[in-house]
Amino acid sequence: MPEWRKDPVTGDWVVIAAERGRRPFECRTGPEERRQRSCALCAGREGETPPEVLAFRYPGSGPDGPGWWVRVVPNKFPAVCAEGELECRACGPYEVMDGVGAHEVIVESTDHEEELAHQSQRQVEEVLWAWRARLLDLRRDPRLRYIQIFKNKGSVAGASLEHTHSQLIAISFVPARIAREMEGARVRFQLFGTCVFCDVLEYELRERDRLVCVGDHVVAFAPFASRFPYEVWVVGREHRPDFADLGEPQIRDLARVLRRVLAGLVEVACDPPYNMVLHTAPVNAGDVSFYHWHLELLPRLTVIAGFELGTGYYINHTAPEVAARLLRERTAEVQAIV
Ligand SMILES: [Zn+2]
Ligand SMILES: [Zn+2]
Ligand SMILES: [Zn+2]
């Protein structure tokens, strides 16, 4: 069973999930090295995954067979598992707890070769609806506090499968990164009565030099303190803590902006590996009204090296204003084509 262990000095948690060490690696380093033509996530091979927890299907098709366009299955090599105790246990000077939660794979296409950036508007919308559906379903488990949806694209970014997919890991406590964002938002709200994300968005829309793509409901911009070259955040224009509260107009606009940003990134940075993380309000965790959902797109053009590991701070060699200008230009061209 996976086990959370707390660093007795920093208080940071690490999940020891030895099961994951057994997973096969299919990913090559770049698109030119793609050798696989098909995998267990492809249509027609549904029997090779654990039984699906959600699938958007054509009428008449049955579970765990063909006839779907987005499919969600438990991860075969999970970092957390459904069973276990929630309590922390002392172990000498240390604290440990069971890795309770859910680890799922959201298969974003039936097609092995089709990356998210190249999928249709409709298909990207459907992936976002699947994210939302899983966020709503998993929160019914009162043991869970945070559901992290993320995407790793390319082996450098941690993907072990080529087939386009995102993942979610639901855990029994609010992770430190989210807790820090929540605390920053809470303090700002108490001091000024405003949301830090709404304030930032208002400023960026006025200043314009870090904007990448502006939609009716979401805005993509290069954050002022970008950690990575071409880092982009996509933030909702309406103040909403919870991604699961998005409706059809917001999902449609988010898909539209995300496709443009991803296509722009492919052009500007030569189809880089990237991580994408959805930050949304914790679940079953009291008042979250001051938080504001957002999507962080983190291209992996640089490696996390000694300084970053030593200090927790990042050296970014591309100013966000430059990144935004290049992405904006490409995004405008993409906009003109589609
Ligand atoms: Zn495949
Ligand atoms: Zn806000
Ligand atoms: Zn965030």
Image: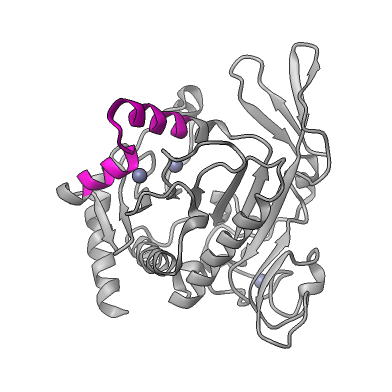
Identify the residue shown where x is 63% and y is 52%.
168
Report the coloring of the rendering.
one colour
Q: At 22% from the left edge and 63% from the top edge, which residue is drawn? A: 329
Residue 183 in the image: state x and y as whole percent.
44, 28
Residue 113 x, y percent position in the rendering: 57, 74
Q: Quadrant of residue 174?
A: top right
- Disc tally is 0
Nearest the camera: 209 or 53?
53
Image quarter where the N terminus lies is: top right
Instruction: State whether the magenta stretch is mostly helix, strand or loop.
Output: helix
Queried whether the magenta region covers residue 23, the answer comes back as no
Pinpoint residue 78: horizontal percent, then vertical percent: 75, 49
| Front position in the image: 108 or 307 | 108
State whether residue 117 is above or below residue 269. Answer: below
Magenta extent: 180-204
Residue at 63% in and 58% down: 134
User: As drawn, which residue projects farthest toward the top?
Assistant: 93
- Give the quadrant of residue 90: top right
Residue 102 sits above or below residue 14 on the image: below
Q: Quadrant of residue 218?
A: bottom left
Q: Is residue 186 magenta?
A: yes
Residue 315 visible in the shown view? yes
Residue 88 placement, left or right of 298: right
